[in-house]
Image (spheres, rainbow, N blue to C red):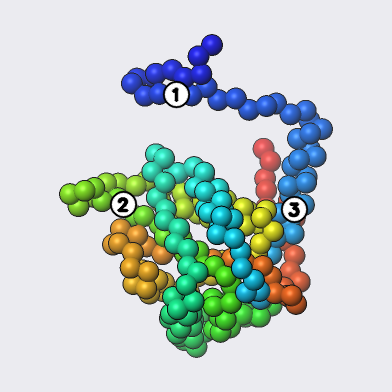
């Protein structure tokens, strides 16, 4: 049988996926969960170099995420340059200082206490790479006309989930950092007007001595409903 056919003028590929036994499914799903459950957000990074090819593989993995009408409305900006990382840290800390001193509610600050966060963000310079994820609100054709992207927020969010999983799978650590507002990233990285910053992710190895908060995840009964 042919592996490709044309449906209404568009090519379709035959899709095959090996069927696993119930035992294999249980073993693989449990193993993957246990590995992902060991993932933690880290604020204490080593400056040890990470091969660029690894970062490229992480981004390629993120790009396999589904997206509205397959528009792939994302740009992953990778920063290794120390001077640019320094600029980002300075701008981020300025915004974070304002947030901690005047923008955040008392409840918000109280909720952050167990995590030990403050406006100081040294990891933005220590981590060997920063990945800034931009969402492409729309596309621009060669004549400057706008072309619609669909479900942009959802699509980019899914891609980030893929990215974080890939980072963990590669033996690295990350942090989802959202200095607010993030418009300074557009200016610093000279991104076009159709791109808006979505997330700033330091990536690297954990510091030799690295501590994370002793927090617990909700159990399955608290996060799911089966019908």
Residue situated in front as seen by the camera: 213 or 20: 20
Q: Which class describes the residues within 10 Å of circle 1: few (<14), some (14-19), or many (20+)?
A: few
**x 30%, y 46%: residue:** 148
Q: Residue 22 placed where, x, y %?
A: 78, 30
Q: Residue 62 placed where, x, y %?
A: 53, 50
Q: Earlier in the sequence, mark 1 or mark 3?
A: 1
Residue situated in front as seen by the camera: 202 or 153: 202
The residue identified by callout 1 is 12
**x 21%, y 48%: residue:** 142
**x 54%, y 76%: residue:** 124
- Could you give the CA–CA distance between mark 3 and mark 2, rounded to whole angstroms? 36 Å
Q: Nearer the viewer, mark 1 or mark 2?
A: 1
Q: Determine whether the residue tagged by mark 1 lies in a helix, strand or loop.
A: strand
Q: Are dots 1 and 3 in contact, CB under 8 Å? A: no
Q: Is residue 211 left or right of residue 10?
A: right
Q: Quadrant of residue 211?
A: bottom right
Q: Earlier in the sequence, mark 1 or mark 2?
A: 1
* Most distant residue in the left direction: 143
- Could you give the CA–CA distance between mark 1 and mark 2, rounded to whole angstroms? 26 Å
Q: Residue 193 placed where, x, y %?
A: 28, 62
| Mark identifier at residue 35 | 3
Q: Determine whether the residue tagged by mark 3 lies in a helix, strand or loop.
A: helix
Q: Is residue 189 left or right of residue 212?
A: left
Q: Are dots 3 and 2 in contact, CB under 8 Å? A: no
- Could you give the CA–CA distance between mark 1 and mark 3, rounded to whole angstroms? 35 Å
Quadrant location, the N terminus = top right
* Most distant residue in the bottom direction: 101
Q: Earlier in the sequence, mark 3 or mark 2?
A: 3
The residue identified by callout 2 is 138
């Amino acid at each position: 049988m042919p592996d490709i056919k044309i449906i209404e003028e568009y090519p379709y590929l035959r899709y095959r996926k090996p069927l696993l036994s119930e035992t294999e499914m249980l073993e693989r799903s449990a193993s993957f969960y246990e590995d992902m459950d060991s993932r933690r957000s880290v604020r204490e990074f080593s400056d040890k170099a990470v091969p660029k090819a690894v970062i490229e593989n992480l981004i390629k993995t993120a790009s396999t995420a589904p997206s509205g009408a397959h528009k792939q409305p994302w740009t992953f900006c990778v920063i290794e340059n120390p001077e640019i990382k320094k600029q980002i840290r300075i701008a981020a800390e300025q915004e974070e200082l304002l947030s901690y001193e005047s923008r955040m509610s008392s409840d918000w600050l109280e909720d952050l206490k167990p995590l030990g966060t403050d406006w100081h963000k040294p990891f933005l310079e220590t981590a060997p790479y920063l990945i800034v994820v931009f969402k492409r609100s729309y596309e621009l054709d060669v004549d400057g006309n706008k072309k619609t992207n669909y479900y942009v927020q959802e699509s980019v969010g899914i891609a980030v989930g893929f990215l974080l999983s890939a980072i963990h799978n590669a033996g690295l650590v990350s942090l989802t950092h959202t200095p607010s507002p993030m418009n300074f990233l557009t200016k610093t990285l000279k991104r076009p007007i159709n791109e808006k910053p979505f997330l700033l992710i330091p990536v690297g190895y954990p510091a030799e001595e690295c501590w994370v908060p002793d927090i617990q995840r909700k159990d399955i009964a608290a996060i799911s409903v089966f019908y």
